[in-house]
Structures are given as C-alpha cells and as structure tokens.
Amino acid sequence: MSPEKLRAELQRLRAMKEYEYGFLSVSNAVIAGVDEAGRGPLAGPVVAAAAILDMDDDFIYLNDSKKVTPKRRDVLYDEIMNRAICGIGIVSAKEIDEINILQATYKAMREAINNLSERPTVLLNDAVIIPGIEESIHQEKIIKGDAKSVSIAAASILAKVTRDRYMEELGRKYPDYGFEKHKGYGTKAHIEAIKKFGITPEHRKTFLKNITGA
C-alpha cells in the first residue's frame, strides 16, 4: 500500500472510531461492538460476536463484513482474534425453531457478550437493543453500525467468518445440499435440493413451511 493510500485508510478508520472516542472522552469505558450473522437463511445457526478493540490498534481494511472479500475477511478474522478481546455466541437451527429467530439472535448476542474475558461497560450494537442485559451496561443502537463503528465492524467479521466456516463444514457433512456455496440461504439450488432430498437437522423447519417437500 502506498503512503498516500495508507494515510487515506487510516483516516477512514479514524472516522469509524467516532462512537468509541465519544464514550472514551467522558469515561474509562470498556466498549464492545456486537453484531450477528445468519438471521435470514433456511439452514444453519445464527451466530453473534462481540469485540473489544484497542483504539490505538488499527486493523487495515476493517469494514462491514459485506463490503470485504472472503479472503480479506479470513485475514481480518485472524488479526481480530489475535489482537482483540472476542466472544462468540451460536444458537442452533433447532433452537431457532423453538424460540424464533429474533429471540435466538438476542440469545446469541448475550452469549457472545458473556464469553468476553473482560466485562464491557458500553455495548455498540448493530441496529438493536439487546434484552436481558444488566442495566449498568449502556447500550447504543447504531443503524448500519457495521459500517460506522470499528467495534461493530470487527464483530461483524467474527460472526460472518465463524458462520461461513460452520456452513462449509455442513457442506462436507451433507454434500447434496451445497451449504458451502449458499451458506444456507434460500437459493434456487438449495430449494431444489430440499425438494429432492428432504430436510436435514440443520434446517429451520419454521422457515420452510411454504416449500413443497420440506
């Protein structure tokens, strides 16, 4: 990366730290970003992640996971896991059917937060307020937060890569379904596989009511 591009990238990252700096300017806050992956698919778990970053540490190319290539996501995942405080929460398809996807998402987020080795005092959440969090922890709901906050962006990378790797494993376990390609989303090929081969224990039955043969 040229010096000019590096300066531009560091400036972009600094702009993504405005929420964090705002809280740090008024208190010694411990800030965790929280995000999830996998609310919409027909199969597989919903995964949430929480990440506490050092604001003096810059993760070059960190951004909303949807704006980052798979190869770069893998690199960022390793960097974040090695240099930040991270927590992951996973809720299975079976439990999604039992408690619904919204409650499953909240549960995964709470698990991710509880799996942090340091207790946060501030949560920066992508578009939600998480129920069941103790009142002493401040929650900030940020719409499209994964593109506005480095902490949420880091959590989005962790959640996305964790879930994608899980679905790649399912692709090896259930080779007829192509999970490694569509990651459980309702593509034409996935729906055709469901109609031909039926459902697996990894499918969300409550998401499949209108699919013939499911």
Image (cartoon, rainbow, N blue to C red):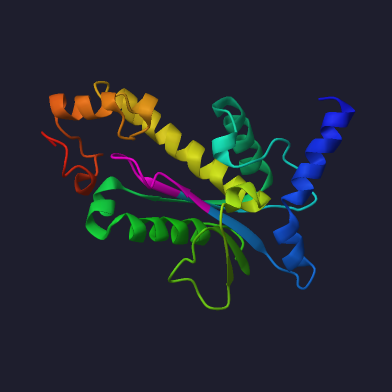
Q: Residue furthest right?
A: 3
Write the residue at 43% across / 39% down: 163
- Residue 57 visible in the shown view: no
**Relative vertical location of residue 37 with respect to residue 186 in this rendering, above or below:** below
Which quadrant: the C terminus? top left
Write the residue at 47% across / 66% down: 130
Instruction: Verify whether residue 191 appears in magenta.
Output: no
x and y, in percent, of residue 110 in the image: 45, 62
Write the residue at 27% across / 21% down: 175
Question: Which is more toward the observer, 133 or 9?
Answer: 9
Q: Residue furthest left?
A: 213
**Relative vertical location of residue 120 with respect to residue 199 in this rendering, above or below:** below
- Residue 161 visible in the shown view: yes
Report the label total: 0
x and y, in percent, of residue 153 in the image: 61, 47
x and y, in percent, of residue 172 in the image: 32, 23
Question: Which is more toward the observer, 166 or 179?
Answer: 179
* 201 lies left or right of 84: left
Quadrant in which residue 24 is drawn: bottom right
Q: Which residues are magenta?
A: 35-47
**Relative vertical location of residue 33 with respect to residue 201 in this rendering, above or below:** below
Question: Which is more toward the observer, 109 or 126?
Answer: 126
x and y, in percent, of residue 55 in the image: 76, 53
* 86 lies left or right of 58: left
Q: Residue furthest bottom?
A: 135
Q: Residue furthest top?
A: 176
Which quadrant: the N terminus? top right
Predominant secondary structure, magenta span: loop
Write the residue at 58% across / 28% down: 69
